[in-house]
Image: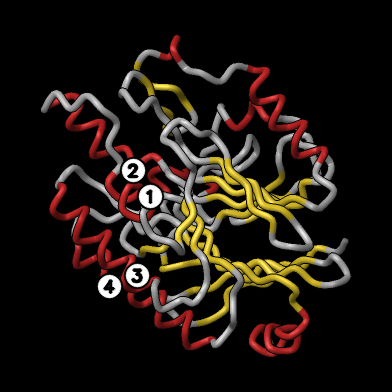
Amino acid sequence: MLEQIVRRREGEALVRLWIITDLQQRIPERAEYCMTRAVEDFLSLELPVDAVCYLGDSVEGNDLGFIRTMTDMQIDRLSRVSAPKYYVVGNHDYEYFRYHQKHSGLAKLTLPFYEAVRALPDWHVQDAFDTFCFTEDFGPFAAWFFPDHGDPAGAWHTTNGEVWGDARRYIYDDAAYAAVREAIAACPKPVFTFSHYAFPGGNRESPLLGRFLPLPQNVRMHFYGHAHIGDSYWAGKDCYRKLSAVDGQPIVQVNCSSLENFRGSAIRSVFLEYYADGDIAVLFRNHTLRRWDEWFLQAQ
């Protein structure tokens, strides 16, 4: 039935996004297996997408050789998807820097995956290490991306919804967060937000994202990763929860993780479809089983 529903509305979508997150492997062979299976299953669907939104944790660990191997592999596999890619830095993207800052005296902030894809014309990322949001206009709606960010000199950085290092030097105060909220409210279009983390109310929520609350009324939905579906060690009793609300607001949050089945219970991703009448659909894809698991429709 889900396959029939998806195909019936396929041509009605004004915009379709493919949302992936949390490949997050230390071993290149595991990363290649998961990414290859996801991309091959995606291509088998023959669903054109307007963009790929990759919500962080593309790599894991502190071995630069492994990280470069996994980076090159992902760039190669995703080059088969004919759409621009938007990358949102997550906590494991900082793992190489955090380890070598502590053990090898690495001073300047270094994010190998981010630095590699930033140089590619079809990849879009924050314009500097310390940029805490960036936007894109998709026609009928706008997208706001909230990446982890850090001081280029390495004095501070954010992960897991907190500021690490010398937090006194963090450059964004409450007024900066309020200014972004006001900019979203002033947008004349519906807005979708994307981050590695959930707002309060979602799985493994981010205190820093909580500084944006309350979200403006034109925010339709939020998409995040970090809390791998099926990973009870980190996500606890809510480890299978895919949908939740932002605390105190009727805004749905969607857990899109993860693109791996070693911590998570399957290789997963999400599609967002936006229709001419303003309705939106969220499609949950299980790449391990090559099937649709759920389909969520929200009316305008």
Q: Which residue is mark 2?
A: 92
Q: Are marks 4 and 3 in contact (CB under 8 Å)?
A: yes
Q: Secondary structure at mark 1?
A: loop
Amino acid carrying mark 3 in the image: Met
Q: Specify the quadrant of the image occupied by residue 150.
A: top left
Tell which of 91 and 266 is nearer to you: 91
Q: Secondary structure at mark 4?
A: helix
Few, some or many residues within 10 Å of mark 2 (<14, 14–19, 20+) = many
Q: Earlier in the sequence, mark 3 or mark 1?
A: 3
Please state, as top left, top right, bottom left or bottom right, where the N terminus lies in the image.
bottom right
Residues packed near mark 1 inside 10 Å, few (<14), some (14 to 19) or many (20 plus): many
Instruction: Look at the numbered discs 3 and 2 and tell me whether their residues touch, using CB distance below 8 Å.
Output: no
Contact between labelled residues 2 and 1, with CB atoms less than 8 Å apart: yes
User: Residue 57 has which mark?
Assistant: 1
Mark 4 crowd level (few <14, some 14–19, many ≥20, 10 Å Cα): few
> Rounded to the nearest whole Å, what is the CA distance between mark 1 and mark 2?
5 Å
The local secondary structure at tag 2 comes to helix
Crowd class of label 3 (few under 14; some 14 to 19; many from 20; radius 10 Å) = many
**Residue type indicated by callout 2:** His
Residue 33: assigned label: 4
Label 3 sits on residue: 35
Disc on res. 132: none
Does residue 211 lie above or below 26 as drawn? above
Left/right placement of residue 124 relative to residue 182 reads left
The location of residue 125, given as percent across then percent down, is 47, 49
